Image: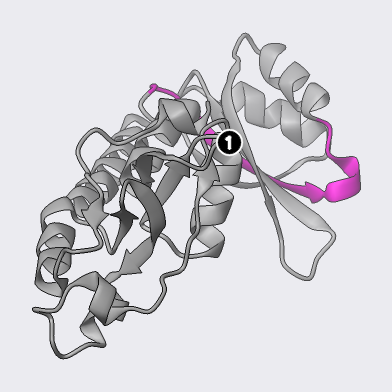
Amino acid sequence: MRANEMLSEEIPPLLHTDSGEKVLLWMDEFKVSHLPVLKNGNFVGLVSESAVLDHLNLESDLDHLFDHLPRPFVFENTHIYDILLKMSSEKLSLLPVLNEREEYVGCISIYGVVTIFSDFGSIKEPGGIIVLTLNAIDYSLSQIAQIVESNGARILSSFITSIHDSTKMEVTLKINTTSLNAILRTFERYDYQIKETYQDKDSENDLRVRYEALLNFMKW
């Protein structure tokens, strides 16, 4: 998925003539801590809540409050993984999107990214979860998939997490069944270390509740 497929339809850009008071009002309304700023139709930068609160005279417009603004953005053909990396590394709640002529075309909110990733990760799909710990050099997704499929199941999604200061990694699997016992026994026969499993209905429901709570927190 690319940036131009993820644009928010709810969050408009600010103008350079808008006041600090309006910035804070809109941030509260749209539940973000950043907003894009346009001048004569051109993207001039991203204003943050913390930067606005550093000023005492919030009645002044953005031109008078700031000599310059940081200008993080992505182009409209940027992949979702690169978008998430940029938002994470720069701690952004919102990311402007420009076309190849560097014209502003819209923005992406972190809430929108999480919503899309929920579909990528099959969070809403019923099933069980297995967390494996293994040496990074031994990782083989084809072997892991073969073990799961040999037990009449399939992998809905998988995530890899590196373990800090270690040669080991964790592989989290979402499986399309909550009956994991046979799969777990097969993993054990292949000497996989099973760190965690979630296979009953209560665990599945708890995962959905936690996910929905996260979305509601970010939205409201």
Residue at point 25% right, 49% down?
13
Residue 113 image position (x, y, % from top left): 41, 40
Seen as rendered, the residue at the extreme front is 40
Residue 21 visible, this orientation: yes
Residue 122 visible, this orientation: no
Residue 140 placement: quadrant: top right
- Residue corresponding to mark 1: 78
Seen as rendered, the residue at the extreme right is 137
Horizontal side of residue 117 vs 19, given as left or right: right
Residue 156 placement: quadrant: top right
Residue 48 image position (x, y, % from top left): 32, 69
Image colouring: one colour
Residue 162 image position (x, y, % from top left): 72, 56
* Amino acid bearing label 1: Thr
137 in magenta: yes
Report the magenta residues as a range. 125-140
Horizontal side of residue 195 vs 167, given as left or right: left
Query: Which is more toward the observer, 134 or 108?
Result: 108
Element marked by disc 1? loop
* Above/below status of 57 relative to 81: below
Query: Which is more toward the observer, 212 or 23?
Result: 23
Residue 153 placement: quadrant: top right
Query: Which is more toward the observer, 81 or 104?
Result: 104
Seen as rendered, the residue at the extreme top is 152
